[in-house]
Amino acid sequence: MKLDVLNIEGKSTGRSIELPEGIFGIEPNGHAVYLAVKQYNAAQRQGTHKAKEKWEISRTTKKLKRQKGTGTARAGSMKSPVFRGGGRTFGPKPRNYSFKLNKKVKELARYSAYSDKLANGSLIVVEDFTLNAPNTKEYKNILKNLEVTGKSLLLTADLNKNVYLSSRNLPKSEVMTVKDANTYEIINADVLVISENSVNQLKTSYEQI
């Protein structure tokens, strides 16, 4: 399958690029995408939540009342979870939420995300470009020329500092290298803009598998 290569003015360069069938033309696997997104979100959690248990509360240990004859249950300390300000029973503890996902599953999820963008007409291939200096207005005009609306993700072959800095102030714009792209970022974008050399990188990595 082929797709026209556009320039930063949004016009066709007269060239087209062959998209690897195994990356952009597969049947999207929804469950693999779900697992990859779940793993990404889990890794973002700090897991630093903590509630104090009975033994960690600093309160008097004086016995509140006599043990018998009150008509109510025995109470030994104000640290008890049954009293306001006491410890918490089975409260949250610091933990690591991340979990392992097989490399092949993550790969399938990423390829499914690429295929979904192409199938929905949300994929644009643009020729490689750079900016002489960080310029948010210029980058915004490039997106406008490409008729990009909503959240956008630009994948570049190599780290382009000026392009990255130009996009940083735009809340609905992301720029990253194609090797760092993950399923969540691809799925979360309304429009995926990928540079010409990024497609070639994907093609090379796919052929080496």
Image: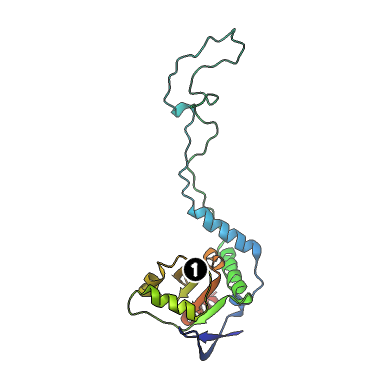
Which corner quadrant holds the N terminus? bottom right
Q: Is residue 31 left or right of residue 66?
A: right
Q: Secondary structure at mark 1?
A: loop
Residue drawn at x 40%, y 67% as measured from the top left: 168
Q: x and y percent of residue 157 in the render?
A: 44, 77
Q: Is residue 107 left or right of residue 174?
A: right
Q: x and y percent of residue 69 in the render?
A: 59, 7
Name the residue carrying label 1: 181
Residue drawn at x 43%, y 19% as measured from the top left: 60
Residue drawn at x 41%, y 25% as measured from the top left: 58
Q: Nearer the viewer, residue 75 or 9?
A: 9
The vertical placement of 121 against 48, above or below, is below
Which residue reaches farthest top? 69
The amino acid type found where label 1 is placed reads Ala
The vertical placement of 95 against 7, above or below, is above
Q: Nearer the viewer, residue 137 or 167?
A: 137
Q: x and y percent of residue 190 in the render?
A: 56, 70
- Residue 160 visible? The answer is no
Q: Is residue 136 left or right of residue 98?
A: left
Which residue reaches farthest left? 133
In the rendered image, which quarter is residue 183 located in? bottom right
